[in-house]
Image (cartoon, rainbow, N blue to C red):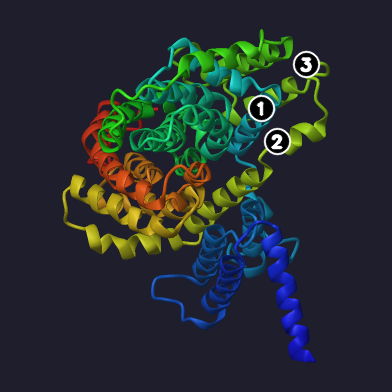
Amino acid sequence: MNTAARGGLFQFLVNNIETSGKNPARVLAGFFSAWILFVLILWVFPVPDGLSTNGMAVLAIVVWASIMWVSEALPVGITGISVPTLLILTHGIPWVEKKGKLVPPMDIVFSGFTKHVVWLSLFAFLVGAVMQLLKLDRRIALGILDKIKASNVGRVIWGMFFVNIVLAFLIPAANARAATLLPVVKGIANLLGDTPEENEAKKAIIIQSLVYGTMICGVFILTAHLPNLIMIGIFNNNGFEGLGYLDWMLLQFPYLGMFVLTQWWVRYHFKTGGIVIAGGHAKIHAEHKALGKMSTSEWMLVSVFVIIALLFMMGKGSPIYELHKFQLGVIGLIGILVLFTPGLFPFKWNEIQSKTIWGTFLLLGGAITMTAAMSKSGLAQWLADGIHGLVEGHSWWMILLIMMAGTHIIRIGMLSNVAAIAMLAPIVFAMAPALNLHPVAFTLLVSDTDTYAYLLPTQITAAVIAYGSEEFSVTDYAKAGWVCILIAIAYGILIMAPWYAFLGMPVWDATAAWPF
């Protein structure tokens, strides 16, 4: 009876997991392996030389969180908010004495949720939610495609690239933009026929528009890619402050040129040259016209965003005009106040909150907390010292090449860019001084290249969304993606490293004065 009861309980769990739309084997394997390794690292395995007991506790949490994020055994946001909880329970960050009693260091373990970049992100999430409710995102996409008279595959892809740039300012997180654009891109792809050439063209449109374009544009805009915010947090915590919204754009805008190279390769690989979309522009024009004129609420949203964007750009050290000295997060909170002025938008709060990616908000806070804990506990430095021997003695470009290739190998099993950068960025940053490399330039080059993990669709959430279109196979994706990974690595070393040097951040000079 006990066996039957256990079997019944197990089947109950499996049924519920399947009903929730997840793979029971993946979820249960991830959940139990995460907790087993957590216990083993925390209480069974000996503490390695050079690592403190606090660092060992943080290592247990990092392994636990990484497995949970990869397997999605827990919702990503729940894993994020659990990181501070486990830091308290394990004393990963030592407790402090107050009034003769030891108490948890709440200000440190929840620091990821108090950083200004988190509140900047929340403002962007809320703007994105209102924009989706107003269908302004669809208007922007169809408007740009209509304007450039998209009638062949090449024009559609370039049009979607410009759509991605515009939406990158408005919708944070690459996965949110990919989900927003999926129905538009899928609708355009459906205008093609079913000849072998047209089927190849569909693959090119979806992969290039929803994955490559989304990720390349995300690196360019500070709020458009959550790993950007994680890296900013690390830089700020280590004395490299002052990188504002415009500064980030200046640093990263050459990455937009990489789309030219990926488009050249995709056009060659999928043989899309000259393939015309039957009735393409007429259909797009008709759909765009059917939306009618912009509503007053849409203009209100654009106005609010423009005002807040100008405040972002005119903060401390602005090359335009220094209007204020507030951090970006404070401006984001001001933006939230303005956004919810009564009467601006005809939506109830529950409609807006249903479109807001709260799980990603919690994931970001937990990831930033985890990076801080890795640094404070000495875990990041210990891991950096362990990797140091693999690259010591090489030239700066060879170190970059080894690190970039190595992170792509590590990334094969990881879904979330946020989780990957939360784990890798503090290690890379800690390695830089021992290698006599500029810590900010080194971290940006390795971490940005990690963003372009194009080997499997399971490595990037945006690619998972694109894969859901059912227009391409894993093999199709890998055959196109491995060349794009090589393009990204070469682009980082040959284009971005010299560009950072031009701006005063040579990766080969750790002593260069901070230009911001």
The residue to which callout 2 is attached is: 355
The residue to which callout 1 is attached is: 132
User: Which residue is at a point 52% across and 18% down the rendered structure image?
Assistant: 313
Residue 492 screen position, x and y as percent: 28, 38
The residue to which callout 3 is attached is: 344
Mark 1 surroundings within 10 Å by alpha-carbon count, few (fewer than 14), some (14 through 19), many (20 or more): some
Residue 46 screen position, x and y as percent: 46, 81
- Residue 102 in view of the camera: no
Report the Cα–Cα distance between label 2 and label 3: 18 Å
**Badge 1 amino acid:** Gln
Label located before the other in sequence (1 or 3): 1
Q: Is residue 342 left or right of residue 412?
A: right
Mark 2 surroundings within 10 Å by alpha-carbon count, few (fewer than 14), some (14 through 19), many (20 or more): some
Note whether 464 is above or below 86 in the view shown.
above
Note whether 315 is above or below 364 in the view shown.
above
Report the Cα–Cα distance between label 1 and label 3: 15 Å
